[in-house]
C-alpha cells in the first residue's frame, strides 16, 4: 500500500510518534504532506490534560533521516490533491490536520484513516477525554475512515483503555495517545488484508469544548469516575 501522511509543519508529539511507529512497523510513508500552523478561532477549555515542557523533533528532520519526501502544503489545496495523485497514494493517515475537504479525501484510492481519542459515535468533536468523564463513557480510541462529516465514516477498529485509581488526566491522555498508535498499525493490517466492508458510524453526539460551567466540576467528577469506571 502506498501511504501518505498528513502532518503539521512544526514540532508535534503525535506527528513525531506516528511517523516513527509507521516506519518501525514496516509502513514507511511515500510522502509527508505538512501544513503550516493556522490560528484556532474556537473556545478551548482550560484544565490541562497533555504534558507540557517536552521537546520534540521537527517532522522535516524525521523525514530527512528516514528518506521520506516532505512537502509543505495546505492540506485542502489543489497542490495537495496533485501530490496525492503523483505519489499514487492508496491510504492517507492523519497525524496532524484540520478538517479535510471531499476532493482531498476522494484523491486517495482507498481513503484516509483518522485515530479519534473517544468512543464513536457517542463521543464526537472536541475534549473527548473530558466529555467521557462528564457523560460517563468509557475512555476509548476509534480508528475510522473519514468522511465529509466530522468524526464520521466507516469504523475500522475501536478499543477501550484502562483508567486506574491513581491516574491523573495526563495519564489518561497519554494512554489514549498510545492506543491511537497501536490501533493505527492494527487498522493498516486490516485494510491491507483486503477487508472493505466496514460499518458506517451512526450520528452520535457532536460536542464542542467543555464550557467553563461544566469544567469547574471536572476534577471532582473525575474522582467518582475512576471509582466506577470498571462498571460503566
Image (cartoon, rainbow, N blue to C red):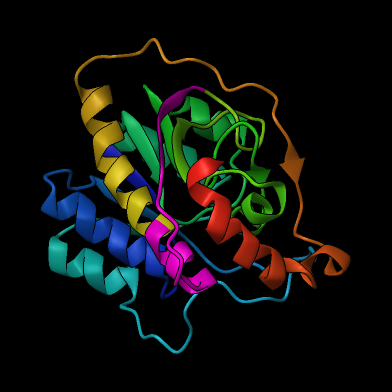
Query: What span is in magenta?
Result: 154-175
Whether residue 39 appears in this view of the structure is no
Seen from the viewer's position, the closer of residues 105 and 151 is 151
Seen from the viewer's position, the closer of residues 211 and 230 is 230
Q: Quadrant of residue 189?
A: top left
Q: How many marks?
A: 0
Seen from the viewer's position, the closer of residues 185 and 11 is 185
Left or right: where does residue 207 sit relative to residue 101? right
Residue 170 forms part of the magenta stretch:
yes
User: Furthest residue to the bottom?
Assistant: 53
Please tell me whether residue 109 is drawn above or below residue 28 in the rendered image.
above
Left or right: where does residue 230 sit relative to residue 124? left
Q: Quadrant of the N terminus?
A: top left
What residue do we see at 45% from left, 57% from top? 163
Q: Quadrant of residue 71?
A: bottom left
What residue do we see at 53% from left, 66% from top? 36
Left or right: where does residue 94 sit relative to residue 68? right
Seen from the viewer's position, the closer of residues 124 and 60 is 124
Q: Residue 80 at what x, y percent from top left?
A: 47, 44
Residue 82 forms part of the magenta stretch:
no
Please tell me whether residue 192 is drawn above or below residue 63 in the rendered image.
above
Whether residue 204 appears in this view of the structure is yes
Amino acid at each position: 500500500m502506498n501511504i501518505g501522511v498528513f502532518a503539521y509543519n512544526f514540532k508535534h508529539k503525535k506527528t513525531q510518534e506516528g511517523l516513527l511507529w509507521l516506519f518501525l512497523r514496516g509502513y514507511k510513508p511515500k510522502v509527508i504532506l505538512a501544513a503550516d500552523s493556522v490560528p484556532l478561532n474556537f473556545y478551548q477549555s482550560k484544565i490541562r490534560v497533555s504534558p507540557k515542557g517536552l521537546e520534540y523533533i521537527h517532522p522535516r528532520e524525521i523525514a530527512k533521516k528516514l528518506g521520506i519526501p516532505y512537502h509543505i502544503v495546505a492540506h485542502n489545496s489543489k497542490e495537495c490533491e496533485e501530490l496525492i495523485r503523483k505519489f499514487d497514494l492508496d491510504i492517507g493517515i492523519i497525524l496532524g490536520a484540520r478538517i479535510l475537504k471531499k476532493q482531498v479525501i476522494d484523491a486517495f484510492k482507498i481513503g484516509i484513516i483518522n485515530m479519534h481519542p473517544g468512543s464513536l459515535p457517542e463521543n464526537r468533536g472536541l475534549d473527548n477525554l473530558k466529555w467521557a468523564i462528564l457523560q460517563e463513557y468509557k475512555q476509548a480510541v476509534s480508528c475510522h475512515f473519514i468522511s465529509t462529516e466530522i468524526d464520521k465514516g466507516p469504523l475500522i477498529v475501536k478499543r477501550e483503555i484502562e483508567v486506574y485509581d491513581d491516574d491523573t488526566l495526563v495519564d489518561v491522555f497519554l494512554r489514549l495517545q498510545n492506543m491511537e498508535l497501536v490501533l493505527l498499525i492494527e487498522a493498516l493490517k486490516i485494510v491491507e488484508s483486503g477487508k472493505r466492508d466496514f460499518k458506517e458510524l451512526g450520528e452520535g453526539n457532536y460536542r464542542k469544548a467543555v464550557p467553563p460551567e461544566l469544567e469547574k466540576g471536572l476534577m471532582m467528577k473525575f474522582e467518582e469516575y475512576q471509582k466506577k469506571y470498571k462498571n460503566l
